[in-house]
Image: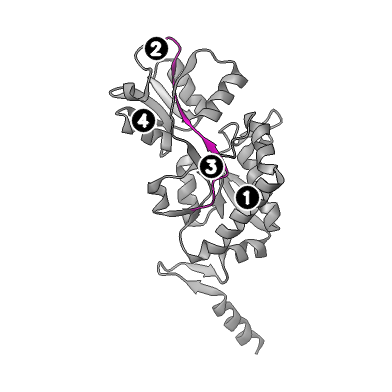
Amino acid sequence: MFKKTTIAVAAVALLVTGCGQTKTAGSHLDRIRNAGKLVVGLEGDWQPFSFHDENDNLIGFDVEVAQSIAEILGVKAEIIEGPWDGLLAGESAGTYDVIVTGVDVTPERQETYDFSDPYAYDRAVLVTAAGNEEIKTFTDLSGKTTANSTGSTYMEIGELYGATVKGVDTLAETMTMVKNGQVDATINASTSVQDYLMTTGETGVVVVAKMEEVTPYAIPLVKGEDNAELKDAINDALKQMRESGKLAELSEKYFGEDLTKE
């Protein structure tokens, strides 16, 4: 009798998807709470969003945002670092519950993912080597070369303006390539570029242009009913963090200004 009951319960506890994969019963949020942890994917080398301090501790704006969301959900944040070009695919495959890594909300991504409410706003900037007289605006990128994280919005912007884009892993790499003349320019978040220039004291590269359009950062979730409750819970957590001043406090801590309002 015990074995039959166990088998019956196990059968109910598994939902078979159309792809032949199995999934524990209950919504994604239920499974997170049952596990007692929120598995978060992020880059870990994109200062000031996520990076390692002098003691090799993982810190950053997105790190603390993720930890705060997990705390409000009543679980712990288990953070896994990975390269940008694998994070969205990892979330779709179930490696991560969510990714919190300054993801731009774009129409293309909205076809595959549901996004939380934005939790910060930024702008893209164009960086060249100091003394470069050929590139002063984004339109000057036509026929030039840039370097950016593979699959990033910044890579797409470079290609949109006619540049040949080389894919690299980190912001530091792109800056070195620009400084050494391996590429003509790079595009990245204003926050990250300014932080890089301030913390390194680098004078070999300069910001020559900034996009007028604001970039909203939000948390992508795989589309479907399974994530509906989780999306609502994350939005509620972000709302609590806004109202308590926590989001603004974290923004001031890592960016030196409040970027949580459009």
What's the residue type where badge 1 is placed?
Answer: Leu
Q: Secondary structure at mark 3?
A: loop
Q: Which mark is residue 132?
A: 2
The residue lying at 38 percent from left, 25 percent from top is 146
- For disc 3, the marked residue is 82
Residue 26's place in the image compared with 196, above or below, is: below
Q: Foreground residue, 168 or 119?
A: 119
What's the residue type where badge 2 is placed?
Answer: Asn
130 magenta-colored: yes
Q: Earlier in the sequence, mark 3 or mark 4?
A: 3
Q: Which mark is residue 238?
A: 1
Q: Earlier in the sequence, mark 2 or mark 3?
A: 3
Crowd rating for badge 4 (residues with CA inside 10 Å; few <14, some 14–19, many 20+): many
Residue 24's place in the image compared with 223, above or below, is: below
The C terminus: image quadrant: top right
- For disc 4, the marked residue is 158
Q: CA distance from mark 2 to mark 1?
A: 42 Å
What's the residue type where badge 3 is placed?
Answer: Gly
Q: CA distance from mark 2 to mark 3?
A: 33 Å
